[in-house]
Amino acid sequence: MEGLLNTFPNQTCFKPFIFYPEIVHKLPMLKLRTGFFTRKPELGFVRRNCINLGRDSHAISSVSVDGGDEEKEKERSMDWELEFLGELDPLDVKPPKKKKKQIKSRLLEDTDGMDWCVRARKVALRSIEARGLSHKMEDLVAVKKKKKKKKKKLVNNEKIDRKLKEVEEDLDSDSEDDFELQDMENLDDIDDLKRKVSMMAGGMFEEKKEKAMEELVQRLSQFSGPSDHRKEINLNKAIIEAQTAEEVLEVTADTIMAVGKGLSPSPLSPFNIATALHRIAKNMEKVSMTETRRLAFARQREMSMLVGIAMTALPECSAQGISNISWALSKIGGELLYLSEMDRVAEVALTKVSEFNSQNVANVAGAFASMQHSASELFSELSKRASGIIHTFQEQELAQVLWAFASLYEPVDPLLESLDDVFKNASQFEFCEDGSLDSNKDLDSDQALRSPVLSFNRDQLGNIAWSYAVFGQMERNFFSHLWRTLSHFEEQRISEQYREDIMFASQVHLVNQCLKLEYSHLQLSLRSALEDKISHARKTKRFNKKTTSSFQKEVARLLVSTGLDWILEYVVDGYTLDAVLVDKKVALEIDGPTHFSRNTGAPLGHTMLKRRYITAAGWKVYSLSNHEWDELQGSSEQLDYLREILKDHLGGSKSNIA
């Protein structure tokens, strides 16, 4: 009995064992613990009290009974033992004859008690086995014995009591959903634990695991880790349907906060992040948002979070995603923001150039150029990639790529050579008003590859022509064919549109001046009527509206104080020089930040073209950059600096600059 009692240290009542009020007992052979456990009476059974048993050799002195003396209590004790062993009729229909109590020596009391406990335990186990629960009890008993043998305590007694109480409640309720209790010794067995958990809730966990794996394999993006494709699609739809930049940011910020609070898996795939930035920039363009508002928008906390997440996810983005992010940053921050971010874009894009299509090449190159952000290694690879897929470029993409390389003054020889090889004939160049003409629509694919036709509009022709002027590559066949196309159609339709198209007029004028001055032997300069029309457009107030920076004013005051005849804002063939000594043909260019790459300080394309042209016109040009000037302390150091850069052209006398 002690083994059974140790298995159930606080409770010894089982449903199969029936007790009656008149069989309240007292066991002289067993120890009794203080306290007792009272069970709620059930249908068909009367209330019974279960006494906790201990190891004390003396019985509790008194137990509350309804009348009777000590002799009756001893008889009832005998009846209780017989009933427990199944020898008495529980309904008391035919009460058996009571055996006459035999007087035994006190030395045998303990021995008989132990024999009785063994028999009682066997009866209890047979009852438990009949109910199909023997393996549960045997496991518990085995655990207990094993723990006792190893003298290892895994959990405290309160946990064991709770486990046993739960098992007893299951026995009383006859539940069909009994769960097998985990062996305390096997809690470290992870495989067994996973197997048992997967069997719970009808295999729900196993099904969920398989579904997550299927979604992982089928995801469209390259985002590492599990994903919820449906959530990603819903988020993407909400981003696209948003009508303003503020709405796009609100939708994205809500998702970011939800992920921060535990939403998993995150629907913020690299594709959705790139889409969000692209739509923000596109909606800004749609309403022509001013630069001031864009910068204020970019400084919002939510926008900073989105850009930060985009930089983290950038390596997982596709080529299109990188293209969209770079384009968006250029439209939102311009040349004033996202310096480190564009360095990050250049680093990642360099590893995926081989995946870029013509649109990706054009957008990435255009983004860096519009932000005046140099990336020499990236542009070198972009040039090679563009030359390899030159047949796939649309007119706008080609114009944008060439303009981008020219703006940053990046070498582009591989691309220029490919253009010469593919477009050898003048018949491959056409002019259209809106650039919507599909010149290859009547050609099969093989013929289109052999002799593709480019149909440019006015802006595209102007950008490409200006780019070749910056490169100093106006002798190439591609340029000559393009320039003749422009001249031919412009001479046929001279109009007043130049007044509205100042950029085109300016580009064409500069290219024509280079052709006249540097490449006169090509005989490609515009005819007088068209040249006069374009020159006239450049003389309008809108074109000649200029602003003088504080940097220019500061340098100009020092130059005037030298006593030399400096002339400010001197015009040479359409170029305005900041300060010149006309008699010596010395020009000093006071170049602010817009003349240099913002991250490397290298001169930009338009600055290099101006210097080259003025030099070709016979002037000695010197540049004074703002970042060099800012490092000088006070007027004294500034004057010394001016003396140093101008000494060779001022007669070698420092007295000329006092």
Image (tube, helix red, strand yellow):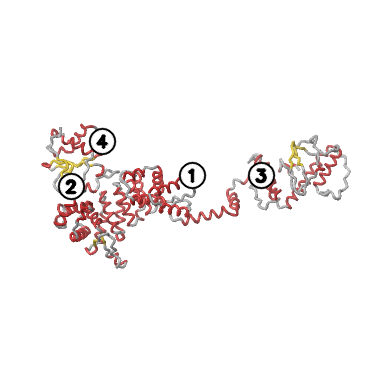
Q: Would you call the spot at circle 4 few (<14 residues within 10 Å), some (14-19), or many (20 or more)?
A: few
Q: Could you give the CA–CA distance between mark 4 and mark 3, rounded to whole angstroms?
A: 78 Å
Question: Label 1 is placed on what type of residue?
Answer: Lys
Element under disc 4: loop
Label pair 4/2, CB-CB below 8 angstroms: no
In this orientation, does residue 284 appear? yes
Which residue, as the protein is rendered here, is positioned at the far left? 583
Q: What residue would you read off at disc 4? A: 631
- Left or right of residue 226: residue 570: left
For marks 4 and 2, the one nearer the N-term is 2
Q: Could you give the CA–CA distance between mark 4 and mark 1, rounded to whole angstroms?
A: 48 Å
Classify residue 640 by image quadrant. top left
Question: Label 4 is placed on what type of residue?
Answer: Glu
For marks 1 and 3, the one nearer the N-term is 3
Question: Label 3 is placed on what type of residue?
Answer: Lys
Q: Position of residue 386 (x, y in %)?
A: 30, 56
For marks 2 and 1, the one nearer the N-term is 1
Q: Would you call the spot at circle 2 few (<14 residues within 10 Å), some (14-19), or many (20 or more)?
A: some
Q: Nearer the viewer, residue 602 or 230?
A: 230
Q: As displayed, is residue 79 above or below residue 512? A: above
Q: Position of residue 421 (x, y in %)?
A: 25, 61
Element under disc 2: strand
Please name which of the two marks, 4 or 2, marks the residue nearer to the observer: 2
Q: What residue would you read off at disc 1? A: 261
Q: Nearer the viewer, residue 42 or 452?
A: 42
Please name which of the two marks, 1 or 3, marks the residue nearer to the observer: 1
Q: What residue would you read off at disc 3? A: 163
